[in-house]
Amino acid sequence: MVVLDNLREGVLAPDIYDPTLNPLYRDMLQHYGAIGLPCRLGDPDRKGKVESGVGHAKKTPLKGLRFESLEEAQAYLDRWEERWADTRIHGTTKRQVAAMFAEERPNLLPLPVEPFRYYQYGERTVHLDGCVEIEAAYYSAPPGWIGRRVQVQWKASHIRLIDPRTGQLLREHLRQERGRHRIQDEDRPPRTPLSTQQLLRRAEIAGAHIGALCQVIHGNQGQVAVRRILGVLALAKKYGIASTDEACALALETGACEYRFVRRYLERNPQLPLSLRQVDPLIRQLTLYRDLIEKRTRQENDLCTL
């Protein structure tokens, strides 16, 4: 058991009775078989004397010295510790340091076989597709968590989703590349959600080929396709329905049924939006509208005179 200071990296919410520890710091202590007890707020004298040892090491063995390599520095410190640091009389206890350590050594636990595996942590919101985003990759959460916050731990090989209230492990995924998805079978909805059905209906109304392509994307990718469908509709708004529908038709014809194909096609083949022509059989001459307005105005003036 270690009585420690309320350092910000270790203690998120200081409290003498129920402090909130940094999850990474808490797991590191647990890995090495230690328990951290933050001291009373504003009363650092209650914790162990550890900070003075840092200054002691800086001023005594290392001050004014330079080393060509880490090995040379480590060898010097080993000699200093054996011949001077361990043989000195401690200022507070008035006992030799080596003798005190010899008494404590039998009570020390052996170090774990593996070192502590460092990870990063944070909080994420589960999006409409049932996934959370971590460094541009997406991982599924259990059903019923859409719109809620979850705690996330990630490292080089694994991603862990944790219930913030109970600390229960919700999901554990293998790390994916940027842009990829990792969805467990039990997280896939048994039927298409109403919001997704409405989104597919919007795509069908926008254009025949747009709706057909979105149906294919959803059939191939499931709930993950929601963002791709939103992307196709955003392209229709940006480049026009006619151009986007033409690009979707080409994607269906070539078998490249992906949002990325449609986006790249429109970026490389932009078409100017249609504008009204000045001369067209369906557009009447402006003089006709002028004469009609003048006629209606004279009729209203005559009625007012009567």
Image (spheres, rainbow, N blue to C red):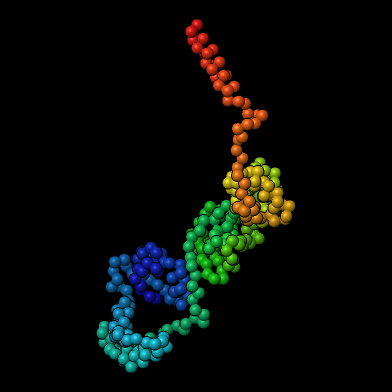
Q: Residue at x 60, y 35 (%)?
A: 276
Residue at 38% x, 71% y: name it: 37
The image shows residue 42 at horizontal and vertical percentages of 29, 66
Which of the two residues, 302 or 280, is positioned nearer the viewer here? 280
Work out whether residue 222 can be spotted: no
x and y, in percent, of residue 57 in the image: 32, 83
Left or right of residue 282: residue 136:
left
- Asked whether residue 11 appears in the rendered view, the answer is yes
Quarter of the figure with the N terminus? bottom left
Is 112 located above or below residue 301 in the figure?
below
Quarter of the figure with residue 59: bottom left
Indicate the quadrant where residue 201 lies.
Answer: top right
Query: Residue 123 at what x, y percent from top left?
Result: 48, 60
Residue appearing at x 73%, y 55% in the figure: 254
Q: Quadrant of residue 96?
A: bottom left
Q: Residue at x 30, y 85 (%)?
A: 64
Asked whether, in this view, residue 30 is left or right of residue 62, the answer is right
Q: Nearer the viewer, residue 257 or 113?
A: 257
> Which residue appears farthest toward the right when viewing the image?
253
Q: Is residue 39 left or right of residue 209?
A: left
View extreme (top): residue: 306
Q: How many numbered discs, if any?
A: 0
Q: Is residue 10 above or below residue 254?
A: below
Residue 6 against residue 238 in the figure, above or below: below
